Amino acid sequence: MGDANRAMFWRIIRRLLGANRGRLFVMLLALGAGAAVTAALLNLQVDAKRRLTTEFRAFGANVVVDPSRSLASDKESGTFQEGEVTKTARALGNPASVVVPFLYVVARAQKGSDSFVPENRPQTQVVLAGTELLLLQKIAPGWQVPTYSGWEAEDYERLVEYCFVGTRVAEQLHLTKGDIVELFYERRVERLKVYGTVIAGGPEDNQIFVQLKVAQRLAHMNEQASLVQVNFPGTPLEIRNYRSALASKLPGVEVRPVTQFTEGEAKIYNRISGLLTATVGIVLLLTALCVMAAMTNVAMERKMDVGLMKAIGGATRRVIRLFLAEAALLGLLGGLIGAAAGIFLSMGLGKAVFGVAARPRLIVYPVAVALTVLVAILSAFPLRRLASLRPASVFRGEA
């Protein structure tokens, strides 16, 4: 009996769907267009979070670890133990985060000669930035930093023999690639070869960048650092959680955000997300109104069908279920086709907005289909008026 009822149910659904193919096409078109726009906007919204995170990484560090004024290991120089801080920052970060320590020393510099004995030459006072030269480009992507193309893995160990010179220091001391620069701090001296120049467009152009261990050796500050910069890719909430975890693990330091980056990213994403969400809501509302208008006409045309079903003993609940099933099938079909088209549409929109095609997100497809089915079911509200029809009134032409 159950199989027979099920077969009859699907036979009636097929007859209902094929009753008026013109109106069926209009409803499918409305649902498919709504699903396409919804999927496109939702995919852009999801992809915008990743895209903004990637774009803001180009600005460099978004978290800075400073020595606490009350707990600094050297209050005059303002430094702290570098090893524990960098190790903890890397352990709490994600695989894409970059942690770079810096030690700043005010030293004297002069252009060196081929002789290993320093000669008296014009000197200038410079800020010496000890850091990891291999990570300099990652922590400050906007800088023009010498590249390491053509180097072998073992050559990286020789970076202690090289330095990067800020463009203004290079002009002042007449330094070019391959020249020797001599650095003086108190009675200690370091002779390094210039590997290239750094163009940062800021105060870094007046600095000389060396390996961290070289700066520590010259200033006699073993295992010390002035600060640690962290480029932690993630959402504003993830960045805040990372800072909180880092601060709890390192009570002796101050963990502060680069607020103009994190707050700017949050504001931009919130505005984009709010705009896209509102647009999705408007599109779904317009789709629902369009389908509802078509369903109203369907309800008027099917009075005789409903009256006949009730006259032969069909329960009102089963009659309404038939029409809701029809609406759900239309929503499912329109959603499957429209959502697929919308995801491809979002790739083109992403290229127009961000310059790079949006990456398809699998989660968007079922969400867009589900929303379309829900809109189709809610749009079938006019069919509820069929539940109150009396068969006798229908047949007499009074309903």
Image (cartoon, rainbow, N blue to C red):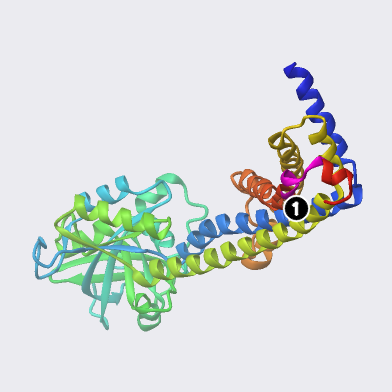
User: Foreground: 301 or 361?
Assistant: 301
Q: What element does badge 1 sit on?
A: helix
Horizontal and vertical percent position of residue 267: 45, 70
Left or right: residue 93 versus residue 381 is: left
Q: Is residue 333 above or below residue 182?
A: above
The quadrant the N terminus occupies is top right
In screen coordinates, is 40 left or right of 164?
Answer: right
Q: Residue 146 in the image: state x and y as whole percent.
A: 46, 64
Is 265 situated left or right of 296 in this image?
Answer: left
| Count of picture labels | 1
The residue tagged 1 is 31
Q: Is residue 75 magenta?
A: no
Dominant secondary structure of the residues highlighted in magenta in the image: helix
Q: Nearer the viewer, residue 78 or 379?
A: 379
Give the class, few, some or many, for how many residues have Cα within 10 Å of label 1's Cα (few <14, many ≥20).
many
Residue type for callout 1: Leu
Q: Which residues are magenta?
A: 385-391
**Residue 338 in view in this figure:** yes
